Image: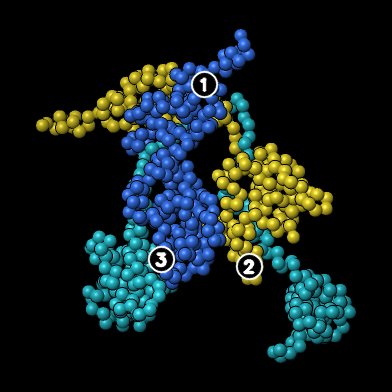
Chain colours: A blue, B yellow, C cyan
Amino acid sequence: MSDEALRDTLFDAPPMGEQERMVEAILFASAEAVSLAELTRRMPQGSDPAEALVTLRRRYEGRGVNIVRVGDAYALRTAPDLGHLMVRETTETRKLSRAAIETLAIVAYHQPVTRAEIEEIRGVAVSRGTVDQLIELDWIRFGRRRMTPGRPVTFVVTESFLDHFGLESARDLPGLKELRSAGLLDSRPLPGASELDEDPEAMGQSEMFEE
Amino acid sequence: MSDEALRDTLFDAPPMGEQERMVEAILFASAEAVSLAELTRRMPQGSDPAEALVTLRRRYEGRGVNIVRVGDAYALRTAPDLGHLMVRETTETRKLSRAAIETLAIVAYHQPVTRAEIEEIRGVAVSRGTVDQLIELDWIRFGRRRMTPGRPVTFVVTESFLDHFGLESARDLPGLKELRSAGLLDSRPLPGASELDEDPEAMGQSEMFEE
Amino acid sequence: MSEPDDWTLTERIPPAERLEAEALIVDVDGYEGPLDLLLALSRSQKVDLRRVSILQLVEQYLVFVARAQSLRIELAADYLVMAAWLAYLKSRLLLPPLPGEDGPSAQDLAEHLAFQLERLAAMREAAAKLMARDQKGRDFFARGAPETQTRRRSVILDASLIDLLRAYARIRTKDEFRPYAFDRKNIFTMEQALERMRGLIGYLGDWSDLTSFLPEGWDRSPARRRSATASNFAAILEMAKRGQIAIRQSDVFAPIQIRSREGNA
């Protein structure tokens, strides 16, 4: 047997049925979503978890638990229609303020978005602590800096935001397409000089008011 | 319709397939094994979880996850032969020490930075173990030597640091002003200390020691 | 509301109007800024946001602000800034443009305001839709018993971005206090003063002026004299508290004198 043939035999990937069991077990054991890269690393060499996932996902369709996609990762979650049976497992979550909910929505729909842009959209300063709370919940994080004067930092939503709201990706946000085609996600500058942005700090960070 | 017939209709148990889904979801989400009595209590009146369990158990035979009986209760467990895949689940995560996280932060914000500079910024000596630990984690590495007397070695952050913290580049780290407005920095600047409140760009990758 | 002025004022307002005004009082806390208030007012026009009459809206806002002021409700500054801007917009909308006038037309400004309102309303709706989605831990659930094994245990050191940022913020906060230590040249600290006075106190026979205790070289520049005087003063207060010296001052602004109490007490 040639060296190559020998190696092929040694590193033969397990049969697909077996790979499916493996993916199933790994996803099952984890409370968090598991990325494809992580699945590949944990399974025997030559395995193709992406393919195994296709059949596994189909197998769980309509069942009490489903395989959901979260960004680049996969997780098992109970079917949403059975939530009422699980009430006992619920832990009290902190009620978000209206400001926090709106800020979260603005980050999700306008990301990457600067603080000044959030304030421009809401027409009011973002209070200290609101952003902090959303970062603490691990729903938003700092994104890359905007390549505009002042290089303001931006905010984007996280994978655990997607996981929490059962979204495959930020593109699946409800009504996103409609909002975009209505032009409501544009950052349209105020015509002419602005007398409205009283905050000099926001001024420096925002490119919205600069021509 | 007689009272009895009406009640029977109102309390019609869900079809067996539905009951199976319910048992599946409850077992999945529970932290503990669930007893038959508990299942009965949580499911709609008239349900027969024992029967649902029989078919559900059969459905999971030979899969990556199995239904096991624990005393009087039932639980879902990964198949014993796949235990080797769960190894990573056993790792225990521990927070970095304060010294290490501070050192890491200084390297990230001031790279390339020498050990003496780290000590100057922190105001205390940096132990060898701290640096070794960060190198071992593959979060910092040696950079090029500083062209100053003694040609001290410098430290920079690694790709895997950026990866771990979800940053595109170290330049994306928020500046002091941004940390403050996110509520991460409580103290207000002292009057006259404003030169320390540099703009985010200067803050990002400071060359403060290279004068 | 307990001030008599307020009572008389409220009495003079007809009941129906007063009730309406009181509704406003309650509501003003509920608004998240002027744009939010404008959005709420625009709803009263009962038309599509795209057809809202900006002129009418401006009028409503200005009436609201005027009424709030007549009821002595403290309005936050940004409400007043918005009022000023809207008053300006109103005048621009009503008057024909001046020949040769620069800048955006009143129509552009009004359109932008309408856009802002529509966008805010859209984000509100999006936020509501988002929160109405099935949520983890409420409508669907993760594995309740993540499986762990004890066969091979390794320790992973971890830190989150927020830990990193907090650590850096902590260090930099420390830095902000550093300037105190920098300018040592012209600062005579209280510790120094205390140390020095303690040494001198043994030689104190009778009452002596505090000003005669300025250390050498600290009486020339005003800055240095100020610092040394203040520290000396703080030091003698401390020493008096410990019962080491007595202090007296015959009159306001008269020289402060000190005397040792050691042995006398």
The residue lying toward the viewer, choosing from A209 and C153, is A209
Q: Residue at x 76, y 82 (%)?
A: C222
Viewport quadrant of the N terminus of chain C: bottom left
Seen as rendered, the residue at the extreme front is C100
Asked if labels 2 and 3 touch by Cβ distance under 8 angstroms, the answer is no
Q: Residue at x 57, y 14 (%)?
A: A9
Q: Residue at x 70, y 59 (%)?
A: B208
Residues indicated by labels 2 and 1 sit on the same polypeptide chain: yes
Whole-percent x, y for residue A209 in the image: 46, 65
Q: Which residue is mark 3?
A: A190
Marks 3 and 1, how far apart at CA: 61 Å
Q: Amino acid at mark 1?
A: Leu
Q: Which residue is mark 1?
A: B82
The residue lying toward the viewer, choosing from A179 and C30, is A179
Whole-percent x, y for residue A149 in the image: 54, 61
In the displayed structure, B173 sits above or below C228; it is above
Q: Residue at x 38, y 71 (%)?
A: C104
Marks 2 and 1, how far apart at CA: 60 Å
Viewport quadrant of the C terminus of chain C: bottom right
Seen as rendered, the residue at the extreme left is B1
Chain letter of disc 1 in the image:
B
Chain letter of disc 3 in the image:
A
Q: Amino acid at mark 2?
A: Ser
Badge 2: residue crowd in 10 Å (few <14, some 14–19, many ≥20): few
Residues indicated by labels 3 and 2 sit on the same polypeptide chain: no
Chain letter of disc 2 in the image:
B
Q: Which residue is mark 2?
A: B194
